[in-house]
Image (cartoon, rainbow, N blue to C red):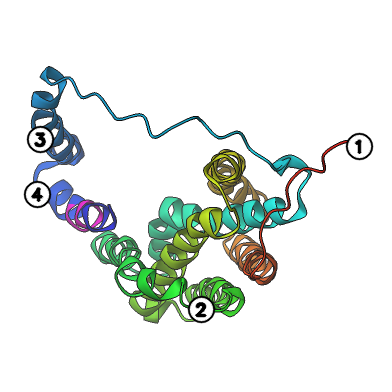
């Protein structure tokens, strides 16, 4: 996904400059159409999934669990800065003096580097005694990246790479916590529904809220500092969500 997004971000400006924005956008439709054609044969097949047994109910009231809220906030507070960057980074960079083509290349690097953590971190996370330092570290890496974009935009490629790595790692950690902090499938499903619904709702609100702050403040300094603070808050929740603990089951009456 990150690689595909990177390709789109990198080529759209050159295509626009050569043939106009309407043709450039039309050409980007080729990839999803190709994916649809590859999937069409599957619609003719009937797959019967084996039943693995009785459906397990959740043993934890996730909405009343502090640990569940810590995992949820970790996901939301780390996804929000990434969504802000995906939505606003090219505008920020062109305002700092980069050309549209350069901003598109940096935006492509941002999305490409989100794929790297899945290649090098996934195999090591479960070997750690806990994930506190890992969770806090990748969130702080995101925070440092936004400070760099604000004050040293000439190194935008570096900051975008660090931001992509930190964001990709934090989102991967957030999803991993769903399994690590639960002991059965029912609890994992309940925590997944809570963490992803609230987390991605927070993420979707990020570009809108920070765009409004930019409009009111007249520049990107305040929004970028706010996004940095959100990333630091994500590091704090990561220290809590990364502990080697599990959701506690409901207390049975009597």
The magenta region covers: 7-11
Q: Could you tell me what secondary structure mostly forms the magenta stretch?
A: helix
Q: Quadrant of residue 90?
A: bottom left
Mark nearer the N terminus (4 vs 2): 4
Q: Quadrant of the C terminus?
A: top right
Task: State the SS at label 1.
Answer: loop
Q: Is residue 196 left or right of residue 107?
A: right
Q: Position of residue 95 (x, y in %)?
A: 43, 63
The circle drawn on residue 34 is 3
Residue designated by label 1: 254
Distance, label 1 to label 3, CA atoms, is: 59 Å
Identify which residue, 132 or 83, lies in the foreground: 132
Q: Is residue 15 left or right of residue 79?
A: left
Identify which residue, 53 or 46, lies in the foreground: 53
Closer to us: mark 3 or mark 4? 3
Residue designated by label 4: 18
Question: Residue at left 25%, top 54%?
Answer: 9
Q: Is residue 109 left or right of residue 85?
A: left
């Amino acid at each position: 996904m990150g690689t595909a997004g990177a390709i789109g971000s990198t080529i759209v400006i050159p295509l626009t400059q050569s043939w106009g924005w309407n043709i450039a956008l039309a050409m980007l439709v080729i990839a999803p159409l190709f994916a649809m054609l590859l999937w069409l044969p599957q619609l003719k097949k009937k797959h019967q999934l084996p039943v693995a047994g009785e459906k397990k109910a959740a043993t934890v009231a996730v909405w009343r669990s502090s640990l569940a809220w810590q995992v949820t906030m970790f996901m939301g507070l780390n996804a929000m800065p990434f969504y802000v960057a995906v939505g606003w980074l090219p505008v920020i960079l062109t305002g700092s003096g980069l050309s549209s083509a350069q901003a598109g290349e940096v935006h492509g690097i941002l999305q490409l580097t989100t794929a790297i953590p899945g290649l090098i971190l996934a195999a090591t996370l479960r070997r750690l005694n806990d994930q506190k330092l890992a969770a806090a570290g990748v969130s702080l890496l995101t925070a440092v990246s936004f400070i760099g974009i604000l004050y040293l935009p000439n190194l935008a490629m570096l900051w975008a790479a660090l931001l992509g790595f930190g964001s990709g790692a934090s989102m991967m950690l957030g999803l991993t916590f769903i399994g690590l902090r639960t002991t059965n499938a029912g609890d994992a499903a309940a925590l997944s529904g809570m963490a992803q619904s609230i987390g991605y709702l927070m993420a979707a609100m990020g570009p809108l809220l920070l765009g409004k702050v930019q409009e009111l403040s007249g520049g990107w300094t305040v929004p970028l500092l706010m996004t940095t603070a959100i990333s630091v808050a994500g590091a704090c929740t990561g220290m809590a969500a990364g502990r080697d603990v599990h959701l506690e089951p409901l207390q049975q009456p009597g």
